[in-house]
Image (cartoon, grey):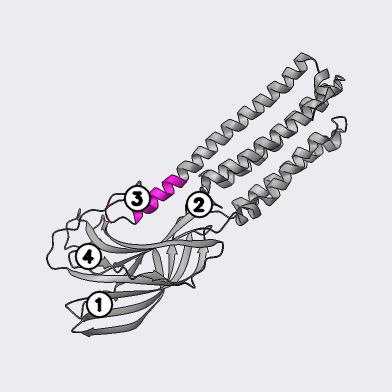
Amino acid sequence: MLGPRWQGLAFENKMLVFKASLITILIYALIIYFFASMMNQSRSRSNETHIARMSPTLGEPGHTPPEPYPSSENYVTVKVGTYFDNVDVLSIKDSMWSTNFYVWFNWKGDAKLDPGGKLVVVDGTINKKELLEEYHGDNGNYQKYRISAKIIKFFDTSRVPLENHMLNVYIENGEMDSTKLRFVADETSNISSRLKISGFKITGKSNVVKPHTYKTNYGSPNLPADSRSIYSQYIAAIEISRINYGFYFKVFLSLFAAILLALSSFCINPADVAPRFGLPTSAYFGAVANTYLVSSLLPASGSFGLVDSISLIGLFTIFIAIVLSLVAAYYHRNDNKDLVVVFDKVMLWVVGLCCLVANIIIPWCANSV
């Protein structure tokens, strides 16, 4: 590739090319290691959180573990299940999703219990609740509702756009705490085959019942000021992940084009100052514009994620192209043209391959597709 020009270079010039290549590779290696480790930790943390959330005994990292139910012999056991019909809105930027689902209750004993009458969707708003079916007989009591609800969810955006999420509906009876009513999850709960979410695939479903503690007496004069209320909470989950890398490439298409534009400057003679420095400069502004565009898809946050990592790699690559062009221009002015030719060819391959490796390893570590 380098041929006679490399052979004809003085030893000190060869060492210059070698040192420049080594420093560039080391810088990229450190950046790749840091961001890849961060993505691995984020993916592991997300999986651990999802497992803990759907465990009857574990608390999510950073949350208080479920407290045991208080002693009581007067509570009624109610079997509860859900069937998700659709997810009509999912907005990561707005930290919300909305769904239509069916929920049913089965119980023995008091027909006037009405567990669905005071149904509460925790962290959500019920837009519409319709009682579709109800009967009471010798075989027990039954209620079936259709619920339209908007759910608040603060999505983990650290691995967008290669992330996975767990969409949860938390159901409680707002009137009766665990001393009066306790839920049992119905294993027949399911998800409609018609349920589709644009850009995502359904990867699993589950449900569980956990104690949920409220550290307040709600101002009741009949309770001690430091009392705590524990409710039985039913949790239904829909697990989703990105379908493929399509959205990822769509998001960063402009950035990748800007990087290629910057790398092409190595093919221009340093004597042609305008195009040699104009290409990476234009590419830099294109990369910055892409960063603003991508950031507009996410909620305001101080966290650093995959989107920021890939954007930083792109901006750094363009910056390196400008710095190396300055080095090449310096030696060209000193009439060391053979060195400049070799330097440009070597650094084109070094920077290009380092950038490519970074854009393979970091997304791979974040990947949940």
Location of residue 51 in the rendering, given as x and y in whole percent from the top left corner? 36, 52
The relative height of residue 7 versus residue 210 in the rendered view (above or below) is above
Magenta stretch bounds: 43-60
Helix, strand or loop status at disc 1: loop
- Mark in front: 4 vs 3: 3
Amino acid type, label 3: Glu
CA separation, marks 2 and 1?
A: 42 Å
Location of residue 22 in the rendering, given as x and y in whole percent from the top left corner? 66, 25
Location of residue 101 in the rendering, given as x and y in whole percent from the top left corner? 41, 73
Q: Residue at x 70, y 32 (%)?
A: 350
CA separation, marks 4 and 3?
A: 22 Å
Decide which of tag 4 and tag 1 comes sooner along the chain: 1
User: Which residue matches tag 3?
Assistant: 60
* Residue 130 seen from this side: yes
User: Which residue matches tag 2?
Assistant: 368
- Mark in front: 3 vs 2: 2
Amino acid type, label 4: Asp
Classify mark 1: residues with Cα within 10 Å, few (<14), some (14-19) or many (20+): some
User: Which residue matches tag 4?
Assistant: 177
Amino acid type, label 2: Ser
Q: Which mark is residue 129?
A: none
Decide which of tag 2 and tag 4 comes sooner along the chain: 4
User: Which residue matches tag 1?
Assistant: 114
Amino acid type, label 1: Asp
Helix, strand or loop status at disc 2: loop
Decide which of tag 2 and tag 1 comes sooner along the chain: 1
Q: Residue 151: which quarter of the image?
A: bottom left
Circles 3 and 2: CB atoms closer than 8 Å: no
Specify whether 365 is left or right of 112.
right
| 42 or 63: nearer the viewer | 42
